[in-house]
Amino acid sequence: MLHKTLLFSLLILSILAMFDHSALAENRIALVIGNSAYQSFSSLVNPVNDAADMTKTLQGFGFDVETLLNANQRSIDEAIARFSTKLNHKEAIGLFYYAGHGIQVDGRNYLIPLGANIRNAADVRYEAVDAGRVLSHMEFAKNNLNLMILDACRDNPLPGSSRAATRGLAKMSAPEGAMILYAASPGQKAIDGEDGSRNGLFTAKLLEVMNQPGLDVYDIFRKTAQAVNTVSKSEQTPYIEGVILGDFTFNITNPEAINQPATSFNQAEILFWDSIKHETTPAFFQQYLEKYPQGIYVDLAKLKIKTLLPAENSQQASLTIKTSPATAQVRVLNLASKYQPGMALKQGRYHIEVTHPDYQRHLEWIELDNKATIHAIVLEQQQAPAIKQDKTTAAKSTRLVEQIDHYRVHGDGTISDTTTGLMWKQCVEGLTGERCEQGKPDGYRLKTAQQHAKTVRFADYSDWRVPNKNELKTLVYCSNGTKTPLPDYDKCGDDGSYKRPTIRTNVFPNAPASDVWSSSPGAYPFNGAGGWVVNVNNGQATYGSDLRRQVRLVRSEEQSGSAFHAPQTTLDR
């Protein structure tokens, strides 16, 4: 299997050399943002200068640039919308640059605008701008090439400490034809310029290299990374994610060289790395070092080998559940195979169910690392059975806790919508408690979310599923009573007078910001990765790439004469 995969990786390089793309006329478009004058957070000296100098440089290279300095959330949101509209033709080349405070919360990257009222990590989703939104617009535009440059990997700006918020920025999955340049590697801090310097370290070096004629974007990144690493004495190493199909040069000495065939050494190296970067066998990365001893990813390849070699010789993970009573039945709900004591498993989270006729059912998630795990579970005895009564009467008398408009709030963590005939889980996956205040939201890719839903048994129901787009949009609540009608993209009015989030928080208290998955597949059948999502921060439904997003599960229940039938479209299969 190893030899086959290595051959496949090499085959990619051979095919690459056979392509012959004709030169295309460019339409260079850029959105540049620099935020310095923060009031709620530490002010920054360099970002406005970085943005101003980046604007001047890009304009010299023929870019149509929109620049925002010290911008608030609304200004940034509106600018991103204009930027995405300009990208909407194939010949466009898009560049998004941001310098300022940035933060990762639960694995997602957020850009912090001026005026953000952020007291803790929970506020970030509502007050900051999700960088993943820009990537989604880039993917949706289907233009030839996109670049995202983030000089925002500074220290966690939140007051106090937060387990959810983490220093530096997290890696994001770049869509096809896009590349992300980070000022620092994941978890590192980007260093501001020395005292008296006009620019931050990363942007200063990047601008120097960009002005050198004839360099493609990979050469520019490698030279910038080497310069930053040297000056910072290895404390900061810029990082690159994604791959572009075709060469791109900022400072063009020969205009006919635009978008020539992708046969450069750097392009071949990037494609080779992209084909092996998720492998767990050291031989793949040793092969990379042999082919590209001076390559972009040499340090990462060595780190991969160092990390993976001990794992090959360490003890394999295994799981044994000790129960009391010993005759209880154990099931691993997110595994197809039957539980056996000492069964070998991969590292990860496993959903355990323990049952016995005379005891209460026990559910628990267990995190396995790379070692043998023995876990003890003691069941609680069943309480005395309640007096039997009519099933319908019992449901009405014990399940209904509160009626809020057309929502019936039950005491078992479920909500019934009397207008649609749908029952919702009150909390998104990963949260529990009466106000959904316990735990933290889980992020899923779309296919994983659908697989997860099949394993969920909650409130005595086992037919939970990921809602389709139209079902999820029924939860959108615009406090100003207006919506902006766009084909498939309904959202609350553009005047910004609505409250965020756009969901009834007195019914669904843990309303997460940003995108929530629907089961409706992507707008473009040729792209199987991704689907429709609904942003509960503004009520908008958009097509989203296959990133980790939150999930709210639903099931259908019988309601007299009120069953909900979503409109039949090609997107709601």
Image: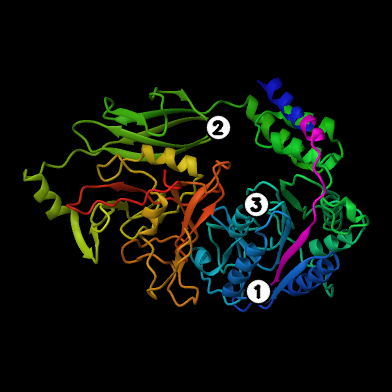
Query: Between residues 413 and 130, which one lies in front from this camera angle?
Result: 130
Q: Residues within 10 Å of mark 2 (few under 14, many from 20)?
A: some
Separation (CA) of disc 3 from disc 1: 38 Å
In primary-sequence order, the first of circles 2 and 1 is: 1
Q: Are marks 2 and 1 in contact (CB under 8 Å)?
A: no
Q: Which residue is at the front of the view, 551 or 357?
A: 551
| Front of the two marks 3 and 1 | 3
For the point 32% across and 66% down, the residue is 506
Residue 280: in magenta span: no
**Amino acid at pointer 3:** Lys
**Residue occupied by mark 2:** 370
Range of residues picked out in magenta: 14-34
- Name the residue rendered at 75%, 38% in the picture: 271
Residue linked to disc 1: 42
What amino acid is at disc 1?
Ser
Mark 2 and mark 1: Cα distance apart in space = 41 Å
Is 409 displayed left or right of 200 in the figure? left
Q: Nearer the viewer, residue 235 or 256?
A: 256
Mark 3 / mark 1, whichever is N-terminal: 1
Residue that numbered label 3 is attached to: 142
- The 10 Å Cα crowd at callout 1, few under 14, some 14 to 19, many 20 or more, is few
Q: Is residue 236 left or right of residue 264?
A: left
Label 1 sits on a secondary structure element that is loop
Q: Position of residue 314 (x, y in %)?
A: 61, 27
Quadrant containing the N terminus is top right
What amino acid does circle 2 point to?
Answer: Asn
Q: Hey, which quadrant is residue 230 in on the image?
A: bottom right
Position of 303 relative to 477 (above/below):
above
